[in-house]
Amino acid sequence: MTVVSALVALMQVLAMAQAPEVPLFAFASPDAAAEWQAVNDGVMGGVSDGRFRMTDRQTLEFSGTLSLENNGGFASVRSRPRSLGLQTGDTLVARVRGDGREYQFNLYGSGRSRAFSYRAPVQTRAGEWIEVAVPLDRFEATSFGRVLRGADPVDPRNVLSVGFLLAEKAPGPFVLEVAWIKVLRREGR
């Protein structure tokens, strides 16, 4: 890493530390589950089993079994659509504990097919809590798991839902726990 790259990274971390936080999702209320839904490869004939529940630790636990049978291979959990109030320059931050698999942090908008989303990879560490921070401009447009080159960047005003997706080509059990999702907003916004 060059000295300039290191300084830029340090400045971004310092700016994030001073940015106002806007809570987006927490899982303490009894009705938190009503805001979420599981969407799995069964919509395309697959047989993966992904489900979620609110735990007594006040977290969302997304778990199940990923299957590649019947051209399947994905399981996801996402918030139900509603205005999230995101703005240009926002950074999404999630506190997660995973199983060592790579998940996708997804953003969903209006007017597109269910297969369209903006994604950013989240590499978990088995059994460890980590905070994942992704600026909105780092999410890539995808459809059916493929990056769409030349697609428009995320329009924060159109983001109605966030979620996590597992689409590794490795069948088997999985678990991802989410403590909260927040927005870091640049000063003056």
Image (cartoon, rainbow, N blue to C red):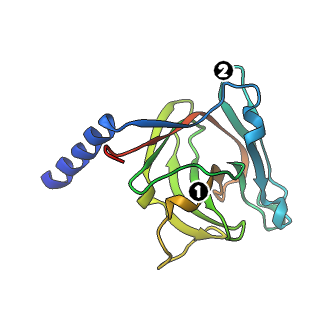
Q: Residues within 10 Å of mark 1 (few under 14, many from 20)?
A: many
Q: Residue furthest bottom?
A: 150
In the displayed structure, does residue 58 sit left or right of residue 13? right
Q: Select label 1 or label 2 by which is in front.
A: 1
Q: Residue furthest front?
A: 188
| Residue beneath disc 2 | 57
Tell me the CA gap for discs 1 and 2.
25 Å
Is residue 21 depicted above or below 107 in this figure?
above
Observer-nearest of 41 and 81: 81
Q: Secondary structure at mark 1?
A: strand
In the displayed structure, does residue 47 sit left or right of residue 160? right
Q: Name the amino acid type tagged 2.
A: Arg
**Residue 156 on image: x %, y %:** 50, 59
- How many numbered discs, if any? 2
- Is there any visible trace of residue 65 in the rendered image? no
| Residue beneath disc 1 | 107
Q: Residue furthest left?
A: 3
- Is there any visible trace of residue 29 in the rendered image? yes
